[in-house]
Image (cartoon, helix red, strand yellow):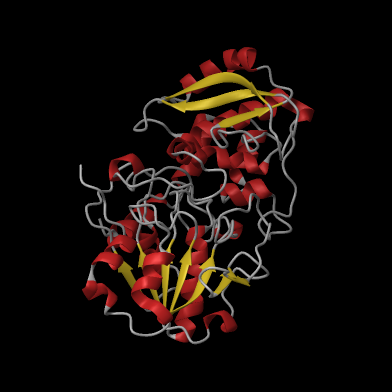
Amino acid sequence: MAMVSTGLQRLIEEKSLQEKFKGNIAYLCHSASVTKELEHGLLPLQRIFGKQLTKIFGPQHGFVTDVQDNMVETNHYVHPYFKIPVYSLYSETRIPTDEMLENLDHIFVDLQDVGTRIYTYIYTMTLLMEACQKKGIEVVILDRPNPINAQTLEGNILDLNYSSFVGRHPIPVRHGLTMGEVALMHQKYWGGGECKLTVIEMKGYERSMSYEDTNLPWVLPSPNLATIEAAYTFVGTVLYEGTNISEGRGTTRSLEIIGHPKIEAFSFLEKLKPVLEKAGLSGFILRPLVFLPTFQKHMNKPCGGYQIHVTNRETFKPWKLCQYLLREFYHELGTEFSWKQPPYEYEYHKMPVDLINGTDALRKWVEKRGSDEEYEAIMKKNQAQYHEERQSILIY
């Protein structure tokens, strides 16, 4: 199978595309902004555009993708090699300031998303679009694959009363869009109407592709998403950021492993099996294990829990699985369980788990041990509208 050509690759290879950009250029990128030869995109763009390339922007986790945690900010500096300023859009501001946007004509956005609502790169992009539309700066999306395919949708639509930097727009948890398509949604439906937007779409990309099918090299898009498997489990395991259950940070399979010091994994699995079976969940194996986080939650304490091994990506429902597991953890652990308290992602009043969920209904469902029917009812709300809007902007 041929390799998919990303927006970046096309810009490097197609002279006619390069000629469209005459003014000063900024590049919003991170460690995963690479060519098919694993060269960082800044190198070819500097070769092509020379002095036109005047600024670099970095998202959460930093331009060099070294920062582990939420609300750990990154400083602005001049890059020692590229000799141009690097501005962090995860600093004292998540919105580019007038000073950052000064003397720019085009901003290339080249971020590897992971296809999950609770991942901030799409919001860095839509906030950038809003700032640029006021200035008449063109935003150019160099599109990249959705690594968990761009056709499977799962999870509830965000209730805008719970919007935050981990959920700005009314989309489901697994949204089935590429970065370019999210930008088009923003332009058409969410307030980006005046933005001068260009999407350089991929060649050879099909919606059904998992990342491996693209034949592109995988570079971790954030410090704890080391594998493509983790991108699939992350859709659900991200939920545990709102709890005192470890999501495996501080292990070498972060976001594929979950657990807590008070869980005995084998006996708890006996209780879980009938519950998960009744809920119709399949496509995975929960492998009991004990792990020792080297940092973050339960640091240096052995935790009992599970590695989620995905056996069938077609039938696997990570969001539903992790909500059901959370409900069982909550009741099994009793007083040993706790919800994370604010602040979380610059929200100082609402519960972190409600921001992750995009609603308070799921937390209440967990606490009262809600039924399958109640879960499905929460999932159903506003889906039809999203499906219709999404359908109207699809590129691929």
Determine if residue 195 is in view.
Answer: no
The image position of residue 14, as x and y in percent, is 23, 68
The residue at 74%/23% (across/down) is 262
The image position of residue 78, as x and y in percent, is 59, 73
Identify the image quadrant of residue 270: top right
The residue at 69%/32% (across/down) is 293
Image quadrant in which the C terminus is located:
bottom left
Is residue 29 left or right of 268 when viewed as pictured? left
The image position of residue 354, as x and y in percent, is 63, 48
Figure label count: 0
Is residue 333 left or right of 46 when viewed as pictured? right
Question: Is residue 238 depicted above or below 158 in this figure?
Answer: above
The furthest residue to the front: 81
Question: Is residue 110 depicted above or below 148 in this figure?
Answer: below
Camera-nearest residue between 280 and 142: 142
Camera-nearest residue between 177 and 16: 16
The residue at 47%/67% (across/down) is 28
Identify the image quadrant of residue 141: bottom left
